[in-house]
Each structure stands twice: as structure tokens, then as C-alpha cells.
Amino acid sequence: MKIGVFVCHCGSNIAGTVDVAGVAQAAKNFPEVAFATDLLYSCSEPGQEAIVQAVQEHDLDGVVVAACTPRMHEPTFRRAVERAGLNRYMFEMANIREHCSWVGKDKDANTRKASDLVLQAVEKLRFDRPLQAKSFDINKRVLVVGGGVAGIQAALDCADGGLEVVLLEKTSTIGGKMAKLDKTFPTVDCSSCILGPKMVDVSMHPNITLYAYAELESVEGYVGNFEVSVKKKATYVDWDKCTGCGLCMEKCPSKKAYDAFNEGIAPTRAINIPFPQAIPKRAVIDPTYCRQFIKGKCGVCAKVCPTEAIDYEMQDSFVQEKVGAVITATGYDLFDYRKYGEYGGGRYPDVITSMQYERLLNASGPTGGHIQRPSDGREPKKVVFIQCVGSRDKSVDRPYCSGFCCMYTAKQTILTKDHIPDSQSYVFYMDIRAPGKMYDEFTRRAMEEYGAQYIRGRVSQVYPYKDSLIVRGVDTLLGSQVEIEADLVVLAVGAEASRGASELAEKLRISYDAYGFYMESHPKLRPVETNTAGVYLAGACQGSKDIPASVGQGSAAAAKVLALFSKDQLESDPQVALVSQARCVGCGKCVQTCPFGAIQLAEDRAGNPKAEVIETVCQGCGLCTVTCPQSAIQLQHFTDNQILAEVNALCQQAMEESFES
Amino acid sequence: MDVLKLDSGYDAAFVEAVMNESGQDPFACYQCGNCTAGCPYTFVYDLPVHQIMRLLQAGHKGRILQSHSLWLCATCESCTTRCPNNIDVARIMDVLRHMAGREGMITEKQVKQFNDSFLDSVKKHGRVFEFGTLVKYIARSGRFWSDADLGPKVMRKGKIAPRPHDIKGKDEVARIFHSVLGDGKK
């Protein structure tokens, strides 16, 4: 075997702390190395060309590139060796950047370590065998989890692109947080007027199957062939019969149910349709408030329903769907405003969240769009907004900036002035973050045209005084404590990962950060992909973001799915398990241990039971190889012999030295 | 107000000393103002506490140690409780007060005199002997008529005893003082 070694400078990233020429020189003495050199940027076009030429000139059988992490450039170099006429699996990468040059500053030590890593790769390469990818059919349907604006956009784009879409929504209507908003920044256009048509498009689109009031129960399978189980939660109303007429809601005697859509600012009925433009416009019974469920008698809705849709006996049901890709668009939740005792959220009725204020401003809200104090219904004249409630605060484990609160607060001050011309808004802020298009101009308008008073500082306490609230804080620019006698206090609550985000991530086998936001595959270059093939992200589930960014990601995720489905077949990764028929005793342990169901028991010609790997299902995790008592099942490209060769390469010398001394 | 020299005026040794003595990182402060917002003594301060933190970031020893705020701080720890970056601001104030004391920059002499009288009493009796503290403070400060009107009232209610009541472990308490002061006594 003739091996070529290419040691990359990566500019000064590696060459700064590693003697790359020295590493290449050392590599010339490694077993079966026929050629070794250093390259300035091996991933660049001239770098790749040098590899191709060397393979052809020196008639090489395999290539080691010592450079960065294989995460980024392994596919690049595999293509390069393929261009040179080799099998793409006759290639190994030694990571001498993240694992070496970026870690330490001692050039001698780094150079020694880099040489060791190269030797390790060479020893592994000696056992590499050419592998061929298999093709498998894919199911060109896509599951979108979450019916907020990001999910809606992703579903519509996929459906318009000709794909069948299954859209899942946890609550009884799609629309998400955007449906609750009154106006949107920086244009102050009506939120439901721009979202409503999209929601209707979802319900009308022939390619979209919508499951509202449903959750993802389980996911099996792999890219191109997922099998998902959808739990349709009991609504106690037969949605095939319900017409959304709303008569039940009108007559329901239980009038104190919690109204999640209106953020609890006013009660609703135990049977309800959240808002007039709901999609689907169907009623749901909340059994925690329904008299039929609590007391066992009532039945008013069943009596008045003109289509006899009420079914108190309804149970949760499950539907199985087969899809080829999943887009998660599960959005965010708002910070619990009761966590800061000093602001009095949850204790004083006139201290409310920004989303509750949004419902007070909204014409479809409980006050018909008239701003009224929750305590006495009086119109407030002085409104204090407190920013960064649950943002940029390490002490409550929310050190990140939620990014949209500065903007929606500016919008709310403008709307306050529009609704109540003789009102005055005060905003306590730390920094104004308005980096979007026309965003900073918008916050300036709030101050200059609408006269909002911006106070650079924090609030220390809010306490009731007569029928108003005293807001005591600081103006750090004045260097003085300040006080405002306010009628209403609005807390600009930040975003946090949606409740249940981590459970869903575990079902989908995707990673999430310390705060529960889903991890993208690369923070800059793969913003809507996850590290699990076939699972994509859209919107605030990946991190707090505003409407334009969420919509952009919805479309981006749809484009990724459309590109994935542009082929009829996908190539499977050949780095999968392989059974040695001669060694296998058919014990079936691998069948039990495989988390993907990729191994089945078959019979050889003599009728003996033998394990058989379904290559397109196997994910190459290696669990079976460590389970097999006979070592009969081996992960190709990572066989026991290869791993041992790597260990020996690193340890042989050290072991000999330790025995000698 | 003088122009602050941000480059040449930065006293790195001072900042490091404050960080070491307090175990706090003043650079974690992003000047939100929560400390000043909740501080009940801002009304008597010459520098609000968030400005002391800012001056500390700028390394301006002189302006900080000359501040009256250091001595007027009641160590109520509102600032510490409210700091979003978990900085123990009250601890920093305490360290700065000690530094000012060591450098002889005592801008509120009577506060220092009262603190010393109080601690002397605790060292001697294991707890505070109010009457003795009072006498010592008056002798030090020369404020003979300070709170004199309260005397008869508290005497009648038995709030101030004429003789000290030592605690059982007063020698141990004294030993704590000696070990902290490092004065060699046992």
C-alpha cells in the first residue's frame, strides 16, 4: 500500500503553533507512507489539486490529510480523492487544529502530538477497504411540528413545492404567538391581517394535512423514511361534525375557565374557540373547568349543539404517519413574570406582561381593543414599561438577550399613544437593541414623535399607592433615583425555550443548548439543519427571534427539504455494520440491542440462524459490535482491528518506554 | 469636574487588590443600575453605587477612596441581592472602605469612630456593651449632646444597662479579633 500524507498549515491556524514541515518530514518514516508534504490551505482549490496530482504521480492507494475537524471538510477531501481515482473511503483525516494547534501554545509539544495523530490516521488507513454506498427510496412527505408563523411558512412553502405536508399543532388553533399580537413592528401593520390569510391557506391547501390539538408521540426511522406516531388529544368535540358556530361557547354555564389565548387576562368558557379567526375553527372542552367533568352533570353544550358534535366519552387517539423529513418549529415560551418579586407581577393586578398588554390592545381581545386596567377597568394615563424582564440576567439563568423586546416595547408605547392620546409612556431600559432594517428609526419615532420617555436604568420596586403603583428606579444617566406614579406597569418578558422542548428533542434525537434551544448544525453556515439527517429547524425553537427571521427560517428549512427530496433516492452511508456469516452464531443479541431496528435474523443456506443488517437503516452507531460475543459483527471503516491499530499507534511507544524504565 | 484619564489614570494594582480582597469581578458589571435603584442610602451618597462600580472599572482609586458613599453604606446588601451578574457589590464596598481606612482617607470620621467604638466593645465583652460604646464614641467624636434626649427614655425602659454583661466565650471572641488583626496577641 502506498499512502500519501498532506499536512495543512491552515494559514497560521495550525502553522502558528505546529511545525507542519517537521510533521510532514516525520510522516515520511511512517509505515507504507510513500509521499508526504505540507500544504498552505489544503481545502483550497490549489490544495485539493496538489492532492489529486500527488495521488496520480506517486500512484497512491490512500490519503491522510492532517488539518481541521472532519466535521467541515471530510466531504471535501473525500470528493478530491475520488477525483484522483480512489475510493472515497480510502481516506483519513487527522485533526491537528481543534485537537492540537488551537489547544496548546508549546510548539515542540504540539508538533509531537500532531505527528502522533498523523501516525494514528496512517495506521487506521492501512486497514481501510473501499466501500460502496447503496441507494434507497425516500418518502417525499414532510412533517412540520408547530403551527406558529415559522411552521406555517415552512408548511406552505413545502406544499407549494409539491410535497405532502403533515402539520402538527399542540393547541387547538394554528397561528402561534403571532396570532395573539395586535400590531407588528416596525411597520405597525395588523398582525392577524397579515397572518390570517396564511392560516387560511394552510387549511385550504390540498397538500397539507393539519392535526391541531395534537402532539408528537414517537419517531422511528431515519432520513427519508421516518415513521411518526401522532397523539390526537381528546377535544370532547367531534371535529368532523363541529362547524365552529360558537353556540356552545355562548351557552356554556362555566364562565371561569383559564383563557390561554388571552394570557389569562380575562376568563373564558369551559368549551371554547380561542379566537374568531382560529384555524381550524373548532371547539374544545377544557375538562378542568367543564361541569360535566367536575360534577358529572350539565350537558348544556351537548343539548344546544346543532350538529350533535359533543362527545364527553372521547379518548386520546393515535395516528401513524410516514414522512421523509421533519421540520421542528416549536417556537418559544415567555419568561414567568412572577420570578422578580420586586416588580409585583402576579401580586398586583395592574402589573402585567407585554403579551397580556398585547391582548388588551387587540380588537379581538377581552376588552375589544380598549386599554383598561385589569383591577378596575379604568383607562391608564401613565404606563411604565420595564425592559429585560428575564433577559440578560445571569441571576435567573437567562444571560442571553431575547432580541425582540426593545422593539415590541417601542411599538407598545406608540400604540398606547394612539389609543389614549393624553397618555404618557415611560420605558426603563438597559440598552436599546434595534439592529434590524428600519428598527432603530422606529425606536427613535417612539421617542421623538410619540413622546415616550426613555429612562436608562433599572427598577428596584413597584408598590401600590392609593389606586396606582409607585415605580421606584434609577436613571443612571442622571445618577439619581427616580420615581413614577403609574397606572399600569408592563413587564417586557423575554423568551425562553418552549416547555417540553427537551422531551421533543430527545424523541427527534437532536441536541439542545443549556437553555433548551435547539442546536443548529453550524451557527453560521447551517443555521436550519440539525446534526440528525432529515431533521430541520425553523423559528424561535433554535433561539429567540422576531417574525421576519422566523419566516425566513421557515422558508429556508422548506428549501432544504425540497432540495433533499429533489432526488428519488438517497445514498446510504456505507459505514455500517457487516456480519461475518462464518462467525455469527445467530444468538440474536445484536437484534435486541440495535436502537434502529436495523438488524434482523435470517437463515443461511443450511437453515442456521444468522444476523442480517439492513444497510439503509443502520446508522453506524456501533452498539451491535460491542454486544456481539463472537465479534462477528463489525462496523465498516471502524472495525475492531482499525481501532486497535489506532490505539497501538498512540500507545506502543509509551508502553515500551514504561517497561524499559 | 476634572477630565478622567482613562489610560494613564488606570491603577491596575488597585483594581487587582480590590479583586483579590473581595473575590469579586467588577468587570462582570454592565452598568444596568439595579444596585443604585434599590440602594436606600443613595439620598446621602455623593457617588451612587453604580458610579463607584464604574470608577472601579476605570481604575480610579483617588475618586473612589475620597468618596463619602463608602462610609455611609449600611451594608444592607440590596445591591448584592439585586445584581443580575451575581456580583457581591456590598463586599466590594466593604473592601473599599477598609482600603480607604488604611490609606487614612476617612471622609466620614464619625462613622469610623462609631464603628471602632462598637468593635472595641465587642472585642472586650464578647458582645456590644451599649453604654460603654456610647461613652467611647462621645469621647472620640466630642459629640456630647448627640442623641442626649434619648438617654432618659432608654434608661427607663432598661434598654441600656449601666454595667457590661460579658458573654461566656468572650475570650474566644477576642481571639477572633486578634487572629483577624494579626496583632500577635493570643
Image (cartoon, coloured by chain):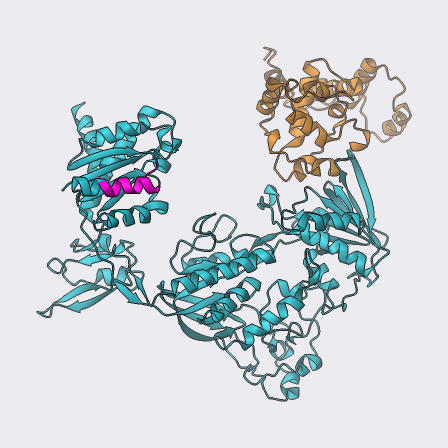
Chain colours: A cyan, B orange
Q: Is residue A480 left or right of residue A260?
A: right
Q: Is residue B39 above or below residue A607?
A: above
Give the magenta-colored segment's residue range: A41-53
- Residue A201 lies, in percent from the top left, at 56, 73
What residue lies at 27% left-to-right and 39% top-to-bottom? A50
A197 falls in the magenta region = no
Outermost residue, top direction?
B184
Q: Is residue B35 above or below residue A185?
A: above
Q: Quadrant of the C terminus of chain B?
A: top right
Q: Is residue A645 left or right of residue B5?
A: left
Report the predominant secondary structure element of the magenta stretch: helix
Nearer to us in this view, A289 or A165: A165
Nearer to us in this view, A416 or A318: A416
- Residue A358 lies, in percent from the top left, at 71, 61
Q: Is residue A439 above or below residue A569?
A: above
What residue lies at 15% left-to-right and 54% top-to-bottom? A630
Q: Is residue A647 left or right of residue A253?
A: left
